[in-house]
Image: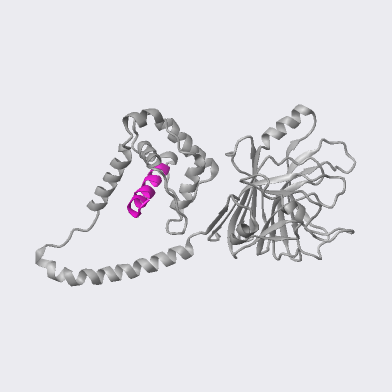
Amino acid sequence: MNALDAKVFVNLFLAAFEQCFGYPFSRPLTETESKQLSNQIWDRTGLTIGAKSIKNYSIYVAYTGNERVENPSIATLDTFARYVMNAPNTTEPERKEKESHYPYWYDYKDRFLRESKKNEAPIAGNRYGAIMKWIGPLIGLALGGLLAIYVVQTRKNKPSLFIDEFRSVSADSLASRGWFVKDKDEKYWNMKGEEPGFLTLFTLKGDNWPDSANPSIIPNLLTRKLEPGCFTAEMQMAGFIPGRNWQQTGMLLMEDSNFSGKALRLSIAYNDYFGGYNQKPEVLIQSITSLGKTDRKPEEIAHKVLFNLGEEKENEMVKNNLAYSGLRIEKNGKMIRLLYTAGPMENAAFKEVISKEFDFEPRYIALFAIRGFVNDSIVIPAKIKSFNLSYFECKP
């Protein structure tokens, strides 16, 4: 898109968002919101804009001016315009036959430009032409300076966003995006790209706190630095179904990268240990905090059972409901909010597990898959679909 079309597209996307949700756009869309807008466009126009594309457009609109580039096709622009302008329902073959010149996009663009010109300040008449000849450039310079200050300040205050969809998991590509791996297990690390579009980790023997026989170690711990302040971190997985103790995958916040400081771990895990009681094995959301290397008794702050495993029919239902899953950590000052999502479709809503104060300032975040230090478990893959990290201004 050229600069003019990009300006019109941003305005068009904002109008489409407000028409769908009833309030102004302020941040990138979640997967659920993207799916909602995609479905409503389909219902109203008979034409399709994919939820993933909508999510990417929302990121572009939210952070206009950064290096991210989006280039929607004329057909997509026309579909957005048809939705905003309440055009008659159609189909793609009908549009190609009767409206292949994409009239709604060009009509919306023309209206936008005409409206923009109306709102421009009128030019002074000839009587003041000579004065404006000199004053105009000075005003332009002053406005330009103010605009520069505004842009710099806005960029300082605007939340920064990192998204990784793991389209490439080569060592160089991961490093260029700020990742580094600790305690590399060459055999399994070399299998991280076995399925395109995913980062695949494996539930190897390890844990982030020691026991009497084993030191703290998590093989293939994919780690990145955190900026100080408040943030939201989210990971999405596909088809991770733990079936032995303590198979799990999730995110780890750390004060340092050597497990000597405070840490918080959030994961989807398996448990069949009930202290001698006879209960069905469970798949759960677990969160554990640790005060550091000298703390031999970490605290389990969340233990939410998602599903119980049992008969074949039950297990098949669990498999279906764990086709897609996700974890989210929101840190605002000392308050930590933990959430999860799980379901047969990608757009299941997040649900809160717990909100709790934990006084620490993590400097690293890591993605992991482990099975603890048990010997009778097996290695299974954990396919990580995406990871998002966004910073925001801390709220009281």
**Does residue 222 show up magenta in the picture?**
no
Report whether 360 appears left or right of 73: right
Q: Quadrant of residue 80?
A: top left
Numbered label tally? 0
Q: Which residue lies at the image location 45% right of the left edge and 38% below the top edge?
A: 49
Q: Which residue lies at the image location 39% right of the left edge and 28% below the top edge?
A: 93
Question: Looking at the picture, does residue 320 appear above or below residue 26?
Answer: above
Q: Nearer the viewer, residue 348 or 203?
A: 203
Report whether 281 appears left or right of 69: right
Q: Which residues are magenta?
A: 1-17
Determine if residue 91 is in view.
no
Q: Position of residue 384 (x, y in %)?
A: 65, 47
Q: Position of residue 5 (x, y in %)?
A: 34, 50
Q: Which residue lies at the image location 42% right of the left edge and 48% below the top edge?
A: 71
Report whether 198 appears left or right of 134: right
Look at the image and name its color scheme. Answer: one colour
Q: Quadrant of residue 359?
A: bottom right
Q: Position of residue 214 (x, y in %)?
A: 86, 59
**Does residue 9 show up magenta in the picture?**
yes
Q: Nearer the viewer, residue 258 or 285?
A: 258
Report whether 394 appears left or right of 46: right
Determine if residue 32 is in view.
yes
Question: Looking at the picture, does residue 395 appear above or below residue 242?
Answer: below
Q: Position of residue 221 (x, y in %)?
A: 72, 57
